[in-house]
Every structure is written in C-alpha cells, then in structure tokens.
Image (tube, helix red, strand yellow):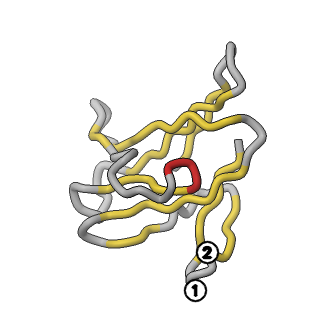
Amino acid sequence: MIKKVDKQSSDRVKVTFVLPEDHPYGDEVSVVGDFNDWTPGEHRFVRRSNQTYSTNVLLPENGHYAFRYYSEESGWINEEEADHFEASGFGTTNCVVAT
C-alpha cells in the first residue's frame, strides 16, 4: 500500500510505503528506486506499533518515480497498488509512484 501526504509548507510529498504484518518477504526489506539510486537498505521497512511495516520517502511534487521493493530473502517485489507500471529495461516491470 502507498500513502501520500502533501507537506503544507514545502514542495515535497511524504510517501509512505506499507507492507502488512504477515508479509512473506523476510526481515530485510527496503524500497529502492529513482529517488535513492536503487540502493537496497537506504529506505528499510520498520515494524510499527500497528504491526505493519513501513518506510517514508520525501519526494518533490509533480514527479513520477520508478521503484520496487527489495528483500534479501525474496529478491525484487512489485507493489500491486502502484500508480502505474513501466518496463524496466531489464525484462521486468517497475512500479511508478506519482507525487
């Protein structure tokens, strides 16, 4: 799941990526994409008090950013609720979030 909140006093949007409590991807999952040079581990999912896992990324407004989730245990994972999907150039599909 993806949640977006416009930051009132800036030109950034807080994008929260959420995985359910019972996700099957293992302990080390992160969101990687255009916004962090596709670097695993930079935006790791953290367990929250409501038992979901989430991570936040601040992104400039009016942008489109390719991303995927990466798990040390499960590899590359797509977010089913992404705004769009596009070819990655590597024979797979990237997710896209629009801000």
- The quadrant of the rendering that contains the C terminus is top right
Q: Which amino acid type is shown beneath numbered disc 2?
A: Ser
The answer to whether marks 2 and 1 mark residues whose Cβ atoms lie closer than 8 Å is yes
Q: Nearer the viewer, residue 46 or 24?
A: 46
**Can you say whether 32 is above or below 51 in the image?**
below
Q: Which residue occupies 60% across, 63% down?
A: 95
Q: Which residue occupies 48% across, 59% down?
A: 38
Of all residues shown, which one is farthest toward the front? 37
Residue occupied by mark 1: 91
**Can you say whether 72 is above or below 18 in the image?**
below
| 64 with respect to 71 (left or right) | right
Q: Residues within 10 Å of mark 2 (few under 14, many from 20)?
A: few
Q: Which amino acid type is shown beneath numbered disc 1?
A: Gly
| 66 with respect to 18 (left or right) | right
Picture quarter containing residue 48?
top left
Q: Name the spot of residue 86 as percent of width and height, x first.
A: 68, 71
Of all residues shown, which one is farthest toward the right? 62
Q: How many marks?
A: 2
Q: Which residue occupies 64% across, 32% down?
A: 13
Which circle marks residue 24 in the picture? none
Q: Name the spot of residue 10 as percent of width and height, x first.
A: 68, 19
Q: Which residue occupies 23% across, 61% down?
A: 26
**Distance (Cα) linking label 2 and label 1:** 7 Å
Which circle marks residue 88 in the picture? 2
